[in-house]
Image (cartoon, grey):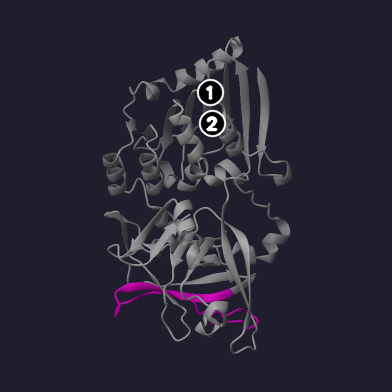
Amino acid sequence: MDVKFIAQGLDPERSHPIGGIIIDALNQDEYNTFSAFVAFASTGGIENIKDQLVAFKNRGGNIRLYIGIDLHGTSKEALYKLIELNLPTYIVFSPNEIVYHPKVYTFEGDNRNMIIVGSSNLTTSGLFQNIEASVCFSYAEEDEQGRELVSDIYDHFNTLLSRESTCCQELNVDIIDLLVRNKVVLSESESRSISNKLASDNTSVPTSDNEELLNAFKKIKISRPPKGHKKTIKQEIIIPDINATVDSHVVHNISEIAVNSMWIETGQMTGASRNILDLSKKGKRDNINKFGSVEFFGLEKDAVDKSLDIDIIYNDRIYRENHIFYAHRNSNWRIQLKGVTDDGFKLTDISRPQFGHRGGFQNRVLIFERTEVANRYILHIAEQDEIDKLKEISQDWAYGGHGAGRAYGIT
C-alpha cells in the first residue's frame, strides 16, 4: 500500500490540491467506481470537476455522492447543478444538533483502488484553495490491508449506502423544495447576505485595510484550479487620464475569470455618464425561472427599501461608494457606478460614452469578481462578442425579467 500525506494551501508553491488529484483519478480508466462522503458542496466545486465526473459516468463508471447540508454549507444552486448533471446524489441530514461532517473520497477498480481521507469538502476552496490536509491510500486489489481499510469505511457508511438510514434521502427537486422551504438550504445570495451582515456587525475595519492585522498575519497566495480548467476571456482595460475630456488609453488582454463571478450585459446603460446598470429581480431561460442578478450582491430581491454601497476595484484602483438601490419609478434594481478613488479618479471617467469604440460601458459585458473583503468587487470589462463564451463557461445564466431582458450569469 502506498500512503501519502497531501498538503494543500499553506505553501502554494509546494501545494498539491486535492481537486487536482481527484481530476487525475477520474480521468484514469483503471477506476470504475467513485464515491464521495462530504459535508458541503458548492457550485464552484462541482463546476471545476464536472467535465471529469460526466466523462467518468459516460464511460460506464459508477458515481455515488453523499452530501451534507448542515450549517448552510451547501447551496440550493449546488443541489440543482447535481440534478442537472444527472449525478447520483444522496442528502444526509439529521434535524437536530448532529452534523454530518466527513470528507472521504474513494476510487475503486478491478485491479487498483485509492482512498482520500482528510479535510477537503467538495467546494472550490476545499478542493483548491484552503489550507487543508489529507492522506491518500493507494493499493492493489489483492492488498489485504487496503481491502480491510475500504471495508471499514463502507461498514461505517453502510446505513447510507443501503439507504437504511432515515437521515439519507435521494436528491430530487421535491427534496430541494422541502429544504429551501424550511430554510435548511439557502441560495448563494442568501448565504452571502448573512456573511456580509456578520462581517459588517462584527468587524469595525475590513481585514484587508487593517494594517495591524496584516502586520501580524501575512496573506497566503490563493491557488487557482489547475491549468486547463480556467475560464478566460478577452478583456478590455481602460486607463483614463484624470485631466482628459475625451481620450483614454485602451488595451486588451486575455484574462482569467474567477469561479462564481457575475457577468451582466450592459446595453446602452442610463445616466448622463452612461454609468447606471440595471440589475434584475428575476430571470428566465427556456421557460425556467432563474435567480436575479441583484442577489449576487447579497441583497434580497424583494427588499426594495434597502440599498448598498460597494467598492469597485478596476485596474488596481479602488473606486468607493458605488450605489445599489431599487428604482421605484422604474420598478427595477440598479447599480450606479459612480465611485471615486482616494486620489480623485472617478469611475465615470471610464464609463463616459465619449470614449466610443475606445472605451466606456455601453454595449459591453461587465464582470464582477468577489474579493475576500465584504462588498468589494473586482471589475472586468469584456466586449459584447465575448457573451457566447461567457454563457458557455457559466454555471447558470438567464435573461432578465420574464426572459426578454439582457443576459447575465454566474461563471
| Label 2: which secondary element | helix
On residue 26, the disc is 2
How many neighbours does mark 1 have within 10 angstroms: few (below 14), some (14-19), or many (20 or more)? many
Asked whether 383 falls inside the magenta stretch, the response is no
User: Residue drawn 57% across and 62% down?
Assistant: 234
On residue 94, the disc is none
Q: Amino acid at mark 1?
A: Tyr
Q: Which residues are magenta?
A: 319-348
On screen, residue 250 above or below 33 = below
On residue 31, the disc is 1
| Label 1: which secondary element | loop
Lateral position of residue 245 relative to residue 92, left or right: right
Q: Amino acid at mark 2?
A: Leu
Is 277 in front, or is 233?
233
On screen, residue 357 above or below 227 = below
When asked about the image quadrant of residue 170, the answer is top left
What is the x, y in percent for residue 312? Answer: 55, 70
User: Residue drawn 48% across and 40% down?
Assistant: 50
Lateral position of residue 247 relative to residue 55, left or right: right
Given contact means CB atoms under 8 Å apart, are the residues at marks 2 and 1 in contact? yes
